[in-house]
Image: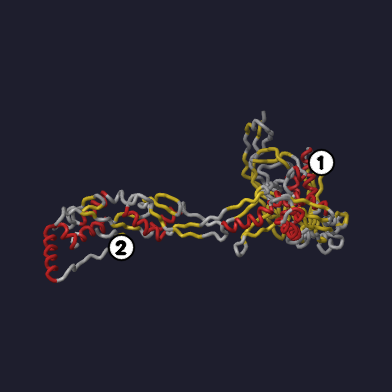
Amino acid sequence: MPAATTAVGRRRVPRPVALVAGVAALGVGGLYVAGLLASDDDVPAGTRVRGVDIGGLSASQAQQKLERQLGQSWPEPVKVRVGDTNGIIDVRAAGFSLDGRETAARAARDGFDPLTVIGRLFSSGERDVEPVIRVDEAKTPAALDKAAKQYERTVKNGAIFFDQGKPVPVQPQTGQVLDVEAAVKALGSAVLEQKPEPVSLPVRRSEPPVDAAEVNRAMTQFATPAMSGPVTITTGGRSIEISPLTIGKHLTVKPDKSNRLTPALDGESLLKDPAVADPLAQATDKAVEAKLRLDGERVTVASDGKPGQEVTPQAIEKAVLPLLTKTGAARTAAVATQTVQPKLTRDTVGPLGIKEKMSTFTVNFEPAPYRTTNIGRAAELINGSIVLPGETWSFNRTVGERTKANGFVDGIIIQDDQFTKASGGGVSAVATTVFNALFFAGVKPLEHGAHSFYIERYPEGREATVAWGSLDLRFLNDSGNAIYIEASATDTSVTVTFLGTKKYGEVEAVKSPRTNVKEPEKRQGPAADCLPQTPLEGFDVNVDRVFRSDGKEVKRETFKTRYVPRDEVICG
């Protein structure tokens, strides 16, 4: 039988054209001529291709018959095994097809092979010819690339992480990708062989640099001992115990340059953890910033700053990390402190350029116990903020998450265009006050967002809301001098004042008329925890911030705000 052939890199088994010499050659030659005389068709009688009889047909007729009866269904899908995964590849969809013309030509051509011709004199003349496969050189690699995605496996290093004070090993994973070029050849052979078992397609494997042995070593030598119990640090005559649960939140194990798993402790985040920060605050004295106030238009020092002692991230890392592989009493160490000078003192106020009122703004609100608590707490946390030139101030970073532990209570907020209850309700009054203070101080806002619908006590287009983890209020101090933020609140108002040096003589707000006005709808509120809403139209509004120096306009910025309608919500 002739060798199987594909249209990509076709190959054939050499056929004998001179079998013997002398008298024997004459005898064989006579048989060959006799065989040719016995078959005068293009394709010898009895020739089949995968069960399709093309004997006695011309090459073109054979091609048409093959393409009609075989080309529409062959080749069939092939079972494959890639790595340790079994699957099926639709080779027709992947660009493998019957080459009817070449298969017919081959059947006719091979009919003149001496062995074939002579053999027909001594047999029934039936013979099977393997089809020739055509491979689409553009389509097949792309199709296999796409099909291979389900078999690919990303190489993954072994690792260790910590969960609830327990070490958790992660075993490595060998990477695996299909060798597309070699897979094309393997599939071509599999199509012709039609074996019932899956054909193994070649893959390229990549071993992870951090293997299982390294994971086991790091678990035994570090991770397990690290989580075996608490460690204790001492400072200022106090002992502070740190649990495995707390340590695990700030501890990582990562490969170094030699792919050895090496522990790292995030001292900065550990110091901010309440389990450490609260007792450490009682054991050390933080630096106290000077308090400023306005005496008329003049900035004066109400109380001077004082140096303090603090534990640095580097110091707590140096103290805690070596303790994690020790046992018993050896898991205790002293942590060093260093003296920290305040940014603001009586002597630095002048050099920092804090000499006048840049802006001040007040927001009034209806009294409510939750507003008094939440607005007062936010103002307390903001008061005394110092923003050096080029620094960014963040509301969320300064005030922190609005939780009960941080001094906030449940109140009314806007969520999904509707009033609802959540911790920290009312804080948007402080955010709006800060936004207007920075607006008129002329500094650059970096992030802010208005309420979804308009609230009447705030200026249109000049108000802000905040949401922990999703929306902040931030500004860049581009004034060229330091800014001191003074914030205070009463039961019905909150005031924010920026002290520093004015960059512009005057900053003015110019509001446009309302446009794209849309009327509200009326709807029934939820069955539980319903809060009624009065209706208010939605609209667009623009506010220009106009900068002037010596009475002349220097530049202008436009703030665009879109308010959705505040639907009327009926409860009960």
The residue carrying pointer 1 sits among few (fewer than 14), some (14 to 19) or many (20 or more) residues within 10 Å by Cα, namely some
Amino acid residing under circle 1: Asp
Query: Residue 310 occupies which quadrant of the picture?
Result: bottom right
The residue carrying pointer 2 sits among few (fewer than 14), some (14 to 19) or many (20 or more) residues within 10 Å by Cα, namely few
Does residue 524 appear left or right of residue 6 in this picture? Answer: right
Please give the name of the residue rendered at 31% of the width and 50% of the height, measured from the top-left corner. Answer: 74
User: Where residue 263 appears, x then y in whole percent?
Assistant: 66, 58
The circle drawn on residue 120 is: none
Q: Do the numbered discs 2 and 1 sit on residues whose CB atoms are within 8 Å?
A: no
Per the image, label 2 sits on a secondary structure element best described as loop
User: Where residue 209 appears, x then y in whole percent?
Assistant: 56, 61
Q: Is residue 449 visible?
A: no
Mark 2 and mark 1: Cα distance apart in space: 91 Å
Mark 1 highlights which residue?
491
Pick the front one: 84 or 563: 84
Please give the name of the residue rendered at 48% of the width and 59% of the height, measured from the top-left corner. Answer: 205
Q: Residue furthest front?
A: 328
User: Which mark sits nearer the N-terminus, 2 or 1?
Assistant: 2
Q: Residue furthest top?
A: 572
Amino acid residing under circle 2: Arg
Pick the front one: 372 or 284: 284
User: Where residue 149 appears, x then y in whole percent?
Assistant: 46, 53
Mark 2 highlights which residue?
10
Per the image, label 1 sits on a secondary structure element best described as loop
